[in-house]
Image (tube, helix red, strand yellow):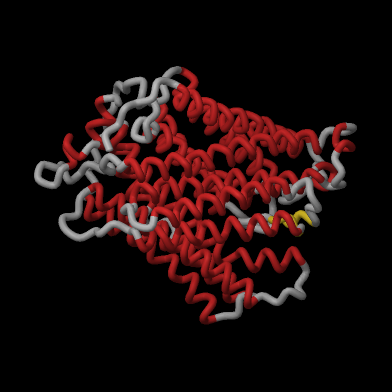
Amino acid sequence: MNTLSHTLLHPAHGLGRATADASIYALPQPTTAQRALARAWLALGLAALAGSGLYSVLLVLARTPGVNQWFAVADFFRVALVVHVDLSVGVWFAALAGMLWSLNTTERLQGWSWAALGLCGGGTVLMALGAFVRPGEAIMANYIPVLHGPLFLAGLAVFGLGLGLQVLRSLLAAPRLGGVIDGERALRFGLSASVVCVAVALLAFAWALFDVPTKLDLRTYYEIVFWGGGHALQFAWTLLMLVVWLWLAQACGGRLFLSPRVALWLLMLALVSVFVTPYAYVAYDAVSVENRQLHTWAMRVGGGLAIFPIALAVVLALAPLRRLCDEQKPLWGALVSSMLLFACGGVIGMLISGSNVKIPAHYHGCIVGVTLALMGIVYHLLPTLGWTAPRGRMAAWQPWVYGLGQLMHIIGLVWSGGYGVQRKVAGSEQVLRSTAEVAGMGLMGLGGLLAVIGGLLFVIVVLRAMRAQPVEVAA
């Protein structure tokens, strides 16, 4: 293991309670059992990313004249898009959350986590196959698009059960956070807070399933069912991102002047807003306008309160850095790209007016910000999990390729949105009337292609690190 990772992760080198530097934001070396679980959840996340890359290729083929006739489903573009989004966002985020929660929890009830992993893996396979076996209508609902077919819906339900079991186990096996508040405890609190947010989201989904009348048209039904819980999930992913920002800034060699006590309070502030979600369901019917607006208000007002102070602390920690070792370059690239993309998504959110492609530009920026942060923490944790640290030009450039592609993607969407190009349409339905609109959507497509390449490069870099000489780590 490299010296930096060993120093930051091993209790005997700076993290013991008696001699610890309280400002170090890192977790101690995991046990063998924790490491095995984390490796397994990471494998599910990588499989989801690889699968989403395959479906992105199918998306291109589904829009290619002549070739699209090979697909049995008439509108295979939307079918493939649903699965691509659910794999690259839903499954990837949940799997990486499972990896981080496994490193954060005690060794209690680990059998539950293995069972949860099996359910999530099985559900993922069913959802992926659902595009080819009686997929039904593709519903482009916000947060969780679905195929209204038996196999896909069964897979989504199984995946949800697995995630629920992992959440329950993570709550019951949560670490005790008493004593002196140091960087480790701040990170642990943030990870545990993300578990609470996902628990709230799952409860919101369950409430909506019982409360929303099934007689509604499919588009409206799924939109309402996933609206409240979808907002709660955004709090969870944001908390994970903030934890990872602090963690990666430390790993890059930055000195964080943010007090762990202040960091913990900021993470707590990010958690508090999620409790608007259950209140919204108690106070208003799930189908009411008031319920919908309350979720939106909670996200706009409470969702970003903790982001700016933590981001500022990370920027100040990174600013003095002049030289990075080979193992730090991928971490630095992922961290900086994550912060830039998330900031772009936030700014675009302030520019939204009407229902056009500025909306997907906003959430693509924010989602990709989270994804890049998770990619960076995977790179950092590879030696901890028994593999080698990623090195070389491919590892150093991968975050920038992925981030640049996504930046081009969202700039093209904002450009086109300024001309009123509508969201959730493709092909001739977009009605591109001017050269500027065509150019904007062309930039969007080119950026999307570059982002797909960057995502596949991430999988390649990680697999190469896994295949290299394994690293001996202490239990």
Task: Point out the image quarter for the N terminus.
Answer: top left
The residue lying furthest to the left in this view is: 18
The x and y percentages for residue 474 are: 26, 34
Q: Nearer the viewer, residue 158 or 241?
A: 158
The x and y percentages for residue 213 are: 70, 77
The residue positioned 35% from the left and 46% from the top of the image is 103
Q: Where is 244 relative to 217, above or below?
A: above
The residue positioned 29% from the left and 25% from the top of the image is 2
Q: Could you tell whether 14 is left or right of 94 in the image? A: left
Q: Which of 405 and 114 is in front in this view?
A: 114
The residue lying furthest to the front in this view is: 111
The x and y percentages for residue 177 are: 24, 58
The residue positioned 53% from the left and 61% from the top of the image is 231
The x and y percentages for residue 354 are: 67, 58
Task: Point out the image quarter for the C terminus.
Answer: top left
The residue positioned 71% from the left and 51% from the top of the image is 423
